[in-house]
Amino acid sequence: GVACGEGEAASAASAAMPLAAVGLLSAALLLRGDAAAAAAVEALKALLGAMKAHRALEDVQQEGCCALAAYAGTGVDAAKEVARAGGVKTLLFAMRTHIRSGEVQAPGVRALRRVAAASQGCRGVLVAANGVAMLASVMKRHDADPAIQ
């Protein structure tokens, strides 16, 4: 599989703009400082919006899942913010839409693991969104991929 940030540039002209936007938003999520915290929440909402608007574009979903995994990995508060902002459903939609793509599944699973580890409430959001069945399906389909197991 292709690691986050190592994929080829979007080949379709229609994918170039949303992919660039996702890249900028993912960078904004990782900024530090007080002002950056508020900016990160806005970047998170914009990233989720871009993922929703471009569900069919695998590159956008892959980069979005990578960005959400990276942001959720910065700490419990960030992981909780992903859940509060609707990130769990957005991740699950990306994973369902691109079920055959290990490049979408691996960062999607990583992001969901980080969100679920944040709190009981976050695990409840994942369960309520039928995430357990989705994760089981993904793990079965990609049983040879250690990044997904």
Image: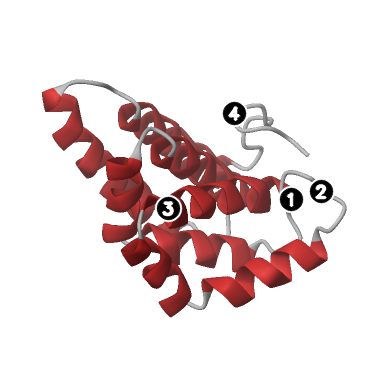
| 87 displayed left or right of 143 | left
| 38 displayed left or right of 70 | left
Q: Is residue 20 above or below residue 76?
A: above
In whole angstroms, how far apart are the C-alphas of marks 1 and 2? 8 Å
Using the rendered image of the protein, determine whether residue 147 is visible from the camera's viewpoint.
yes
The x and y percentages for residue 108 are 57, 52
The x and y percentages for residue 76 are 33, 43
Contact between marks 4 and 2 (CB within 8 A): the answer is no
Q: Which is more N-terminal, label 2 or label 4?
A: 4
Q: Nearer the viewer, mark 4 or mark 3?
A: 3
According to the image, label 3 marks what residue?
Answer: 115
Residue type at numbered disc 1:
Gly
Q: Residue at x 45, y 57 (%)?
A: 116
| 15 displayed left or right of 104 | left
Residue type at numbered disc 2:
Asp
| 75 displayed left or right of 112 | left
> Which quadrant would residue 96 be assigned to in this image?
bottom right
- Badge 4 crowding class, 10 Å Cα cut-off, few under 14, some 14 to 19, many 20 or more, is few
Using the rendered image of the protein, determine whether residue 55 is visible from the camera's viewpoint.
no
